[in-house]
Amino acid sequence: MDSVVHHIKSLRLRDLTLFTVSAILLLDTLAAAAAVGASSIFWWLFLGVIFFIPFGLISAEMGTTYPEQGGIYAWLRDSFGGRWASRATWGYWVNTALWNPAIFILFAAVFSQLFIPDLALKWQIGLGIALSWIAVAINIITLEVGKWIPNVGAILKVVIFIAVIVGGLAYSQDHGMANQISFETLKPNWGEGMQYIPVIIYGMLGFELMCAGSDEIHEPAKNVPKAVLFSGLIIIGLYTLGTAAILVAIPAQEINLVEGLMNTLYLFFGGSVWGDAFALSLGVAALFTFFSNGVTWSLGCNRAIAEAANEGEFPAFLGYEHKSLGTPIGAAITMGCVSTCVLVLYGLMAGNSEDLFWSLFSFSAVIALLPYIGMMLAFLKMRVSDGETPRPFKLAGGMAIAGLCAGSCISVLCLSIVLFIYNPNHGMQWPVFVGAIAVLIVGEIVIRSAEIRKDNSLRQS
């Protein structure tokens, strides 16, 4: 009997564009970036040139040249072998398992701010756990249905960003600007703002995510580059203008990383019955986008690790898929268990929702950035060792430009990792460092154990 899973070609250009916008355009990143001050606008544009654009172009080339299920895992496997691919995939997957609790805590905090101001942290954690398992259920259904979570989330994000931008312009006409935006203030801030710069890079990751389900993409050679272009223009434009809008209304030092968005919405639109209702409706829409963020990343990462598990690089239960739908049941349930444990453990240590959000965010971000260094190295390796393979989309300029783009991305990624671990104003962030090392060690144990079982199975056969 044929055991091959046949995936449904359910992702078209519209879906890929919205999926990528949903993955990369993050409302929580908007508030964190605005906390840098006016110089964050410079960083959005500067890092957009030296990282975001090269990253998008490299993702488009890899996704169209090697349209394999698993995306980043398949690219690293073909470049450096299964072990390095598995290490990167572990970081890719476990980051989402750690980051989803952060984004679901953000959901719970804003839900509390909107509807139950005195909601205790333990109940916020309970809500986060419930959202984790709803995300698991969405991962198990077919992408033909599940794709509408990121699709709708992306549309709502764009609506909220536009509302913030328009509201900021209107507010500044009557109240002036809370932060001056001038040539002097736009210059990079190498002081307190340094701790937030990696957040901007984190808010630019995700172009490659759509390629984790390459078997489910309709005409990837045609649609992946277009999706990168369209989503990239939407993302960098809204990030830059949205950050400026928040800075118009709220002094940078007063921006709360969890509650900053709702504070801005009520400031821009509140004060009347209809204005408060409009701000509340945008807040409810924001809640959905927080949930869709977690779903979007888990849809891609669970498919990546399931593909690796099916090749014997991870425990077999992570590769268990629905027999007819091909959805990653084992990886999704495992992610739900990890997210639940993380929420409970960190909840015992955090004093409030902002502390919990930032701790989870920083910890997961370090793990998240590592696989992208591997992706850039894989891009260069395949350009050299597999240059004869036809490339439906190819970064122009030969190896010199390819090396410049990949090198620029690697440099920015390494700097971001360092800044998450070592804050120039607050010193070494030992919990982040120790936690990241511990997760990498656990991953190494899991990978080596799977390799031993795989070797024993081959010997017995």
Image (tube, rainbow, N blue to C red):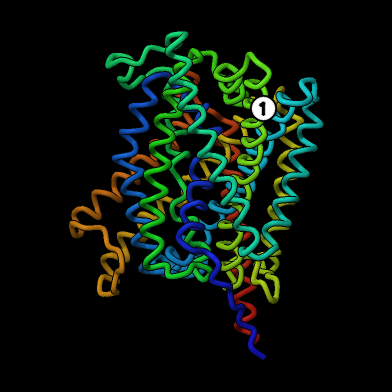
Q: Quadrant of residue 148?
A: bottom right
> Which image quarter is the N terminus in?
bottom right
Residue 179 visible in rendering: yes
What is the x, y in percent for residue 317? 70, 67
Q: Residue at x 71, y 27 (%)?
A: 350
**Count of residue discs:** 1
What is the x, y in percent for residue 103? 63, 38
> In the orientation shown, which residue stands out farthest toward the front?
274
Q: Residue at x 71, y 49 (%)?
A: 338
Left or right of 237 in this view: 148: right
Q: Residues within 10 Å of mark 1 (few under 14, many from 20)?
A: some
Amino acid at dot 1: Leu
Badge 1 marks a residue whose secondary structure is helix
Q: Residue at x 73, y 28 (%)?
A: 349
Examine the rendered structure and indicate whether residue 268 appears above or below residue 84.
above
Q: Nearer the viewer, residue 25 or 78?
A: 25
> In the orientation shown, which residue stands out farthest toward the top?
175
Left or right of 191 in this view: 461: right
Q: Nearer the viewer, residue 45 or 453?
A: 45
> In the orientation shown, which residue stands out farthest toward the bottom?
1
Residue 84 visible in rendering: no
Instruction: Find disc 1 in the rendering and name its residue.
Output: 280
Q: Nearer the viewer, residue 393 or 346?
A: 393
Examine the rendered structure and indicate whether residue 43 appears above or below residue 288.
above
